[in-house]
Amino acid sequence: MARQDFVVQGLDCAEEVSLLKGTVGKLEGVQELDFSLLDAVMTVTFDPDRVDPAEITAAVEKAGLKVRTEQEEEAGFWARNGRRAMCSFSGVTTLLGFVSHALLHHSLSDAFVGGEGIEDHVFPLVSRLFYLAAVISGGWFVFPKGLAALRRRRADMNLLMSIAVVGALIIGEWFEAAAVAFLFSFSLLLESWSVERARRSIRSLMDMTPATARYICPHDGDIMEKPVAEVPLGATVLVRPGEKFPLDGTLSKGVTEVNQAPVTGESVPVAKEPGDEVYAGTINESGAVEFTVTRPASDTTISRIIRMVEEARSRRAPSEQWVEKFARYYTPAMINLAFLVAVGPPLLLGGSWSAWFYEALVILVIACPCALVISTPVTIVSALAASARAGVLIKGGAYLEAAARLKVMALDKTGTITHGKPEVQEIIALSGHTDREVLERAAAMETHSDHPLAQAILRRAEAAGVTGVEPAQEFRVLKGRGAEAVIAGRKFWLGSHRLLHERGQETPEIHDRLEAMADAGHSVVVLGNDTHVCGLISVADGMRPEAPGVVADLKRAGIDPVAMLTGDNQGTAAAVAAKCGITEVHAELLPEDKLRIVREMVDRHGHTAMVGDGINDAPALAAANLGIAMGAAGTDTAIETADIALMSDDLTRLPWLVRHARRALRIIRQNIVFALGLKLVFMGLALAGIATLWMAVTADMGASLLVIANGLRLLRDRG
């Protein structure tokens, strides 16, 4: 099987997709069609022994569209500006036809109406020529598609407009025919512009990464500018203050602060030191640094974001699928209704054939589902683009709507509600010692250990300025209980509550303090010597400071319950949950337990989201209606497996996501109701003999413009 991309000129909405499925999709040997409206690309999977690219190109042209070559992409004025040029020409010639008619007949009203009856309407020859030019130019991109739809016996908006324009010419309504052709051409131009704006919004992400990198030659240390695509993995690259990182990598020299907003949406610069990850497109705020390239230009985090947002467009939302199905049946139904209006009253009531034929044409124009069809994809593309810029990667319209319908959310504790690594929470000095003395002695003993609690104490010592601590002497591990060593000639011990109890140095006061810390979910390290207890150090996985506010925001948004799932013990889980306002807690869980509980929540409550790190929570993420990965910027697995990936560790993105998705769904519903409601109003006016062709097409164009503008508002929604 072969797989090839075809850039299709004018591939802007579902109508073109439907046309191509009806021609290319029916070729023998074509196995699968995929479409990216953001790139105007049709990807065809086909058997090269049964069909070749030339036949596929011919099938595209049979649908009234055209495949663009690379040369046309680079230099083709017509490919870039043809639609705009023809629409402008149609508008100018329509105006010239109207003005010439008014001047020659000395009457504006005659140019509009031309007398009491349609039969009496006489157009000057020059006006008819102008109007004919307007019809041809306005329908330049419409008539071929209408003919293709007629050949396939599948009515669409292009066929509706073609019938309306030709019908108006047949009954002598030249001005109306030209106005319909121009205004419909203008509405398609607006539609094309709206999709192109969404395309530019996504593609602007690509402009965030520099085209070249300062590559440090490993042989002589010379610095040379190289295109990012030519920089090999493992190369060392220099980035100066104020410049963007050109590739993903690991910092190897220097310290700095990096503005990661383009990738993660974080508003505050992040401190970086050797060993930390850096991402292409992020901005080096301070010192000159060097980093080692870990990913090629084609696979940087920002490249993957762009690729996945583009792929997301093919994962259509339920409302988008509903609109397409509705239009599939709605359009032929409207053609049948127009036929009944054209022949019913003259046959049954003796009405004027020309008058009722005109009203049938009005109904055809009103019936055009353009605003209805474009309303949903423009809104969804805008929402996806805004989300990507806010550091929230949503992998399709279906997941956007799922986020809007959420009722319940389950949060993993470690790495989601908490930071994911233990930190010193409290130091209690006893027996006349100071906090600094307790920390110095504990750090002296913990330099021998790589235990997570030991590393937490060492980090606290460094942060407190306790540096240059000499390791303790004669260090000896007390298996399962702690350790002992000699510091400055005196023996000290460090360990758990159990070790304290074994040594017989526990007092009622110390016991009460240890129990209180344990109840709060803290692990306690006790420091002592042969005569007394020197102090207590409590260590815990610190809760994110924004967690309580986020839980409250979710509940205010109607997400209830907000549950916590964790493998930690019940005491620790309950303590963390109490601090952030979570009432439903499931502790001491294995991955299969999390999977079971999420399934139960889905069965009990319906629309459920699971938020985790995208790796060890993968089964639960898959079981939920919506899987959301936290802090996915550096995690390939999270980006690939989750339905939605939060590119930073910012919990506040969760309530923002719910609000953003609900706003998008609300706009989709507004657009659908408005588009259908306007059509119903004009149907009534047409049946009452009030609506005219140009009024109907103006209303349809206005509806298209309004739903597009309404959908594009989401591009400004960045939290």
Image (spheres, rainbow, N blue to C red):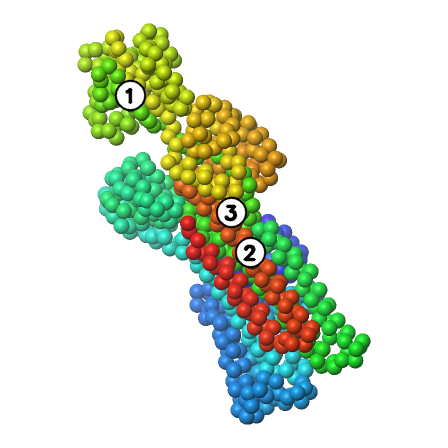
In this view, 209 is above or below 344: above
Residue designated by label 1: 428
Q: Residues within 10 Å of mark 1 (few under 14, many from 20)?
A: some
Give left or right: position of 359 versus 564: right
Asked if one can make out residue 11 in the rendered structure from this viewpoint, the answer is yes
Q: Where in the figure is residue 549, as x and y percent of width and height? A: 42, 39
Kind of residue indicated by mark 1: Ile
Residue at position x 68%, y 74% in the image: 688
| Circles 3 and 1 in contact, beta carbons < 8 Å | no
Q: Secondary structure at mark 3?
A: loop
Indicate which label's residue lies in the foreground, 3 or 1: 1
In the orientation shown, which residue stands out farthest toward the right? 348
Residue designated by label 3: 395
Q: Where in the figure is residue 423, as x and y percent of width and height? A: 34, 28
Residue at position x 67%, y 60% in the image: 328
| Circles 1 and 2 in contact, beta carbons < 8 Å | no
Q: Where in the figure is residue 59, as x and y percent of width and height? A: 62, 63
| Circles 2 and 3 in contact, beta carbons < 8 Å | no
Q: Secondary structure at mark 2?
A: helix
Asked if one can make out residue 13 in the rendered structure from this viewpoint, the answer is no
Kind of residue indicated by mark 2: Ile
Kind of residue indicated by mark 3: Lys
Quote the CA–CA distance across marks 1 and 2: 57 Å
Closer to the chain start, of discs 2 and 3, is 3
Q: Residues within 10 Å of mark 2 (few under 14, many from 20)?
A: many
Residue designated by label 2: 668
